[in-house]
Image (cartoon, helix red, strand yellow):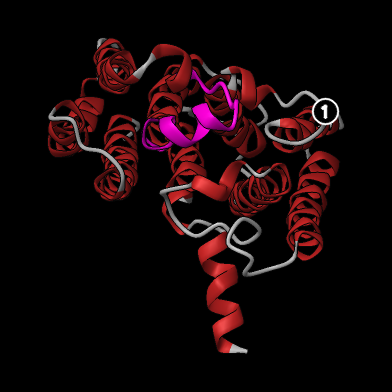
Amino acid sequence: MQESLTLWIKGARPKTLPAAIAPVLVGTACVSLEKSIDREWINSLLALVVSLALQVAVNYANDYSDGVRGTDQKRVGPLRLVGSGSKSAASVKRAAFIAFGVAAIFGLILAVTTTLWLLVIGVMCLAAGWFYTGGKNPYGYIGLGEVFVFVFFGVVATVGTTFVVIQKITFVSFLSSVVVGCLACALLAVNNLRDIAGDTVSSKRTLAVRLGDKHARNFYVLLFVVAAIATIVLSFSHVHVLLGLVGLATAILPIRKVRSGAVGADLIIVLGMTGRTQIAVAVMLSFGLVIAGR
């Protein structure tokens, strides 16, 4: 029983969960800049549940879809439940749907308490999560995975969190979402960089495969540069958000490893480092936003 639970936890890919936590943390912090507005703080917690459930659902759905296609047979990265034969395809698909269901239920609660327009966004999120690698023509197989991550785990999750708390979309939350989105993309970028060889053989044309090894590494670095620029632009009106650059400083080591040509298992370590950088930036940026709002 314990061994089975351990496998499910590994299959959920815990190292990717910062991509779900960061936007909610930053989106909530953006609220501190708004004065004389009623706040529904409980909605921030509900948004966190939705974000985490969606991340886990996408991970399981990706595991299932890649597994049944045979894409994971030459995978270097973390455990894949279907590809390794640890769990049946049916059980992993069921786990994905359960996680999607949790996201849908809590998303429905948020929609009912704020605006039913969130239902439209919710359906888009669920569809995007499944068709990333699922369906006949998954967009993750043609190099559009980073677009999905930036939009849904960056802009939608960050701006959406601010909105469900104060029912207002702000420019600060949008600009902050650019920072969050870039770092979420960095997680996927290093993941796909690691898998270039296997994905090429499996005809999975991720952005990393399309760019090639050298340019894929440059793209990874570029994402941090854009995040830094967005932070600096945001500091023009709220100087304290420059604290976010302190968090970005933790990206120096993983960037060095990527630029030095790290491959295979070494990039798994870089994936963990990238996740820690994402959390560090989210914490420091949020701290700066809260100070600015005082």
**Residue drawn at the location 40% of the way across and 24% of the way down:** 182
Q: Which residue is drawn at 77% across and 23% down?
A: 137
Q: Considering the numbered disc 1 on the image, is that residue within a helix, a strand or a loop?
A: loop
The amino acid beneath tag 1 is Lys
| Image spot of residue 237 (x, y percent) | 29, 12
Query: Which of the pair 237/116 is nearer the observer?
Result: 116
The C terminus lies in which quarter of the figure?
A: top left
Report the span colored magenta: 190-207
The quarter of the picture where residue 230 lies is top left
Q: Is residue 29 left or right of residue 152?
A: left
Q: Is residue 174 left or right of residue 283?
A: right
For image coordinates 16% across by 26% down, the residue present is 259
Q: Name the residue under label 1.
A: 136
Query: Which of the 4 quarters of the picture holds residue 9?
Result: bottom right
**Which residue shows up at 64% across the image and 50% down it?**
63
| Residue 168 appears in the rendering | no
